[in-house]
Amino acid sequence: MSEMLARWNELRREEAEREILACCGSRTWAASMASKRPIQDEASLLAASDVAWQNLREADWLEAFRSHPRIGETRGKKTATPQSSAWSAQEQQKTAAADESVKMAVKRGNREYEQKFGRIFIVCATGKSASEILEILKRRLQNDEATELRQAAEEQRKIMTHVLDTARGKPAAGVPVRLDQQDSSGQWSTISAAQTDQDGRCAQLVTDRATVAEGVYRLTFDTASYFAASKQEGLYPAVEITFRVRSGESHYHIPLLLSANGYTTYRGS
């Protein structure tokens, strides 16, 4: 257990709820997480986060949505915590650097979305350009209310997910990651490669438009580079996670919880 998690486990319940609220924006979610303490490790923390989010009511999801700024803006509503606003600004760095014409198109799309659905557009913006986000916005404007609510809830859940360096109690930033697929002959081919951002996220391995076909896949984490950059003596120079995608299942969330002398992985919800 990291020092950060151990400290949070010892807080009074009100303080624990207030501190974790920045990760989501839903008071019901924060209360649920605080009630589950003591949480033994980071894997249990992420699993509890997923379960708590999936069990929220629609009103709780909408409260969480309101804590985020619009795409293209860096400040949320007054209900957002300073930490939440800072994370959102970091997540939207590529959007902030876009051409003015693209920013204006996103602004018009935001307005159209809010008129149709009555809430702001939620998307995991990490690793996405303003043009990519604009295309996603246009596609999701075609959704009906029920479909779009579920899509927005899934995007919010992505925003809550982190890859952690459990020894340091921090997101594992700058980890090179490669996604490979195995063919019928057993040979591997690379689909994409990326690097975790400052929040430990790597959301751009499979694009929003892509469909993950049934088959066997492999995630390879270049942990040697990460340990060298963070001045740690790591036991494992690389971590490979091989997993199977089954027919009819489109979402695979596979966290890596890393330390210098070990790692944990599991399938998130």
Image (cartoon, helix red, strand yellow):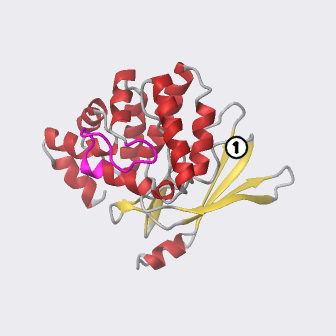
For residue 222, which quarter of the picture? bottom right
- Does the magenta segment cover residue 45? no
Amino acid type of the residue that numbered disc 1 sits on in the rendered structure: Ala
Magenta: main secondary structure: loop
Q: Residue at x 26, y 32 (%)?
A: 27
Report whether residue 257 is seen: yes
Q: Is residue 12 left or right of residue 84?
A: left
Q: Is residue 191 left or right of residue 66?
A: right
Horizontal and vertical percent for residue 82? 25, 50
Quick one: 84 or 105, which is closer to the camera? 105
Horizontal and vertical percent for residue 213? 74, 41
- Does the magenta segment cover residue 70? yes
- 228 in relation to 68, above or below: below
Where does the N terminus fall, quadrant-wise?
bottom left
- 56 in relation to 198, above or below: above
Horizontal and vertical percent for residue 146? 53, 20
Q: Which residues are magenta?
A: 69-84
Secondary structure, mark 1, is: loop
Q: Residue at x 60, y 25 (%)?
A: 143
Q: Residue at x 47, y 25 (%)?
A: 115
> How busy is the neighbourhood of tag 1: few (under 14 within 10 Å), some, or many (20 plus)?
few
- Which residue was labeled with disc 1? 210
For residue 46, which quarter of the picture? top left
Q: Is residue 212 left or right of residue 260?
A: right
Report whether residue 268 is seen: no
